Image: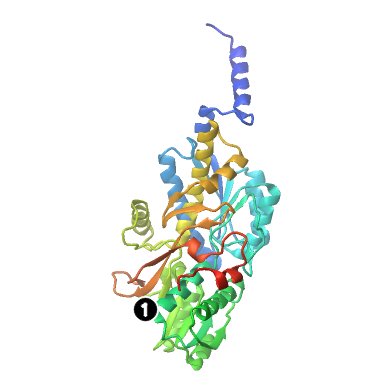
Amino acid sequence: MNISRRTLMRRIGAAGLAAAAPGVFSPAIAQSKPVRIGILAPRSGAMGTVGECGVRAVQWAAERMNKDGGIAGRPIELVFEEETSPKDTIERFRRLALQEKVDCVQGLISTGVSLGVAPVAEEEQALLIMWDGTTQDGVKEAMPKSRYVFRSTDNECEAVMASLLAIKYFKGKIKRIAGINPDYSYGRNNWEAFQQILKRAGVEVEVVAEQWPKVGTMDLTSHVAALKAAKPDFIFSSMLFADLPVFMKQGSAAGLFEGVNLALPAAGWQINQLKKEFMPENIVFGHNTLYFALPNASPLQKAFVEDYMGRYKEAPHWEADRAYFALAAYKAGVEAAAKATGRWPKLDEIIESIPKQKVESLGGPGQFRADKIAEQTFYQGLSTNQNSYDFPTLKTVDSFTADQLQKPPGMDFWEWLKTSKLPV
């Protein structure tokens, strides 16, 4: 049948409008139009190396997924913006959601930033899946009934686990405790949780020192001197930025760690900077949701770690897992909703679908609860310098699932600590 050029163009235009209309599914359009994922991550400053690890992982994940068909037949396109101050990051989030018109925004590491961005995501009805950070302030949920915001595991999970392992490995040797923790809610909450868990386990202690350096403090000699003068037998520190390697190096030079046991629940973020030359062994060492040298690791983790270490000449840490998990959870939610509806799903359908999907991430299986908080597996253990790297690894590998380490939906954290069935 012969048709005129004008008729042909009219039919093509009508087909395009139909494909663009809400609720109309066109496989051809779905396969050609990218799924645009906005990424908000720090690339410089105190959190620069942390953000870079997550960025590398999400790039690796997108490339791997695109080779396997992308998301429901559509290729993934990443659109990057930087996480900095809350004010500037909010502006960049709005640019991603309103100007770039991304399908989903992922990222965020700082709790302070997430507390500002998350309400904006709800206001703009824009899907946000966090890598890290939370919407907690003093472990009070700022957004207990979020619709568009999916959050990471609670920040306190790592401190709860480190406290449990301190009791497991050093009970009877913990009498004089000292803390050096970052001077904001994360550090103060973790230090308080450590003390409460010791009390609940019947470990009677004397607090001999509390040090609260500002984040980013690079001269910690006065803090080291104060700790040494207090003569603790156990030091708990949830320091996790570039100041942690500085503390360990300066503490080692001062002889602070001689005859002292330590718990570093968030040390994994600085794994490549914590050199054997100043790191004592037998530290409770936290790797959060990714331990790069996990025995019997999944084929996915082995492939990622091998590629990452070969390419960047350093070990990946848990921000890589958080970034991979966010993208994998979104992909699973979209594809499940598309299968159920027979078309590209609407945003509300994707949001409803994501919590029902269990996904394989770099650190193992994980999923979002109905309240949109992640549940994943955590790894910690006692450190050793007996390895082929220039930094510590684990000689014992302990793992806990998040449902053992974080409060259930709607419950106060401090009340949960008092009443939960902690494995102490």
Residue 364 pos. (x, y %)? 41, 55
Dot 1 amino acid type: Asn
Find the residue positioned furthest to the right: 123
Q: Is residue 219 visible?
A: no
Along the line of sight, which residue is nearer the eye, 345 or 216?
345
**Dividing the picture into quarters, in which one does residue 169 lie?**
bottom left
- Residue at x 53% of width, y 56% of height: 374
**Dividing the picture into quarters, in which one does residue 14 lie?**
top right
Along the line of sight, which residue is nearer the eye, 419 or 169?
419
Q: Mark 1 packing: few (<14 Cα in 10 Å), some, or many (20+)?
A: some
Rendered position, 290 above or below 245: above
Quadrant holding the C terminus: bottom left
Residue at image mark 1:
282
Q: Is residue 359 visible?
A: yes
- Residue at x 47% of width, y 92% of height: 231
Rendered position, 158 above or below 212: above
Please state the total of marks drawn on the protein image.
Answer: 1
**Dividing the picture into quarters, in which one does residue 18 lie?**
top right
Residue 39 pos. (x, y %)? 55, 52
